[in-house]
Amino acid sequence: MKILIVEDEYNAREGLADLITKTSPEHTVCGKAANGQEGYDMAVKYRPDLAFVDIELPKMNGLEMIEKLRQTPEMKSGMPAFVILSGYAEFRYAQQAIQYGVQDYLLKPISYEKLKSVIRNLAKLNELKNMQSTDSTIKRDMILSSILQNDAVFSREALKNLDAAQQPGNRYLLTLYYGKNSSIEGLTKAVIQFCQYYDFPDYYISIMKDDRLLPLLITTDKQFAEIEKILNYNFIYSVFKAGFRDCTVTLIQIESSSELCGMKDRIKTLSSWALSLGNEKVISPELVESMHPDNSALPRQFDLEALYAIKNNDAGELKKINRQFVDFFKTRRYTPSRIIRTCTSYAFSILVCYQELNVNAYDRIQDFRVFDILKNCCTADDMVDCLNNIADMYAACENENCQEYSLTVRKIINYIAASYSSDISLEQIAGKTGITPDYLSHLFTKEVGISFSAYIKKYRIGVAKKMMLDSGCKIREIGEKTGYGDPKYFSKVFREVTGLSPREYIRMRHP
């Protein structure tokens, strides 16, 4: 796709061009204009597929430039998609831009994600306009997914295609939310076979991989009750039999095509009822409305059992409790939102315990974005996978030398691993644990076999040895990074632990 940039500020113009190159290297910036007249001339000359146009331009403002292009005869068959750029969040600009047929409106400064989204959506539109093949499967896939995601102008164009092609009859949106390990090809094949078997010639199928959704729009003379019966007694059975037992099937009757716009979120919300209802029956809005949510109190024993397993360093037991915790919801009729809130609270309790045991592990697990993932879970397996991933990440972060020690000693060892570069004292740790320094020292020496101070020396020098092999740091810098601000004292401790000076060790390893 060829892209034209019309922007009078040099830095903004070059910055946008650079951002386009980084976000969408498959597309080409064919021209960069500094005023409206120059932008008009480049548009006529290069015939871009997409033009980013600032509103406030010298010689001719952006909207005037667009209007002039629309009145230019040679541009009638090759008008680009326009995206307006402006630092002014004023409705009158947006309103006027819509009148000129502008596809999108971006406020400065432009974010990376927004720019990427705009280019992706308009590339789809360009592909649809240029599509000359008769491959209806590809075209229909683009149409349905774009409408459901409400992809800007593409969804409007897709709706036109949909309304023009659809036959009279009852319309149903059947959607499969599939497991992360499912074969999309196999699942798609099963859905197409279903359409062929029940003689649904007029259907649109799509694959929305990012959301793990496979929506199917069918038009038929069959009534809702009959379609629901077919799905419950035939379709779900055949899908499960084919090996896709982690699929959730939802069904929504559609009165008009416009209802489909932006329906993705509604589909995911409906799919999330599988957390409570399971996935062995089709889930419809009518079924959900007939539910009487259970408002009984949730048990706390799962939290207590999970914390006990963590403190005993038993990841296998924690995973077993995770499964029991999630399966408990199947015995009740809690709403999905309540299940997710409860699961989030459960995960938070686990994270607090991890933070107490190992700061390094807690920080790394936070990067996993636990709560965002839980919020978007639609099945019990999704939820269990997320909780088990937390357990696996903690196990990977736990210091390998402290797996068999008591909870108190594990805390000390993990604290040393997190804080070895700063001053560490037994008194500091004792203050954090509420245990006297003398008893802490006795317990540590008894379990580890060496004193607290000896362990710190050994640990720090172990880190220093790795840094000497893996980095280009100077000896002084390595000493500072491992908690020894005095180079002479660092060398003394290094020789005490290894029998060599730092320089001798480096020469031996790098002759």
Image (cartoon, helix red, strand yellow):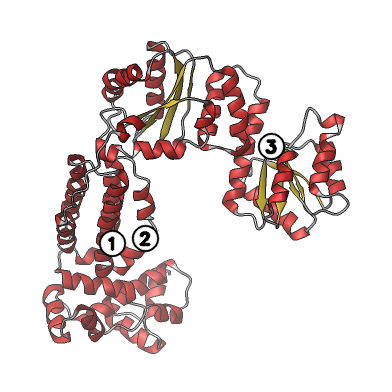
Horizontal side of residue 246 vs 102, given as left or right: left
At horizontal 35% and vertical 36% (from top left) the residue drawn is 271
Residue under pointer 3: 1
Asked if the residues shown at circle 1 and circle 2 are in contact, with their CB atoms under 8 angstroms apart, the answer is yes
Residue under pointer 2: 366
Residue 409 place in picture, x, y as percent = 18, 73
Label of residue 351 in the image? 1
User: The residue under label 2 is which amino acid type?
Assistant: Gln
For the N terminus, the image quarter is top right
User: The residue under label 3 is which amino acid type?
Assistant: Met
* Camera sees residue 230: yes
Number of residue marks: 3
Residue 288 place in picture, x, y as percent = 31, 35
Residue 82 place in picture, x, y as percent = 72, 41
Q: Earlier in the sequence, mark 3 or mark 2?
A: 3
From this view, report whether residue 258 is shown above or below residue 68.
above
Question: Dot 3, crowdedness within 10 Å: few (<14), some or many (≥20)?
Answer: some
Q: Which of marks 3 and 1 is nearer the N terminus?
A: 3
Horizontal side of residue 492 vs 477, given as left or right: left
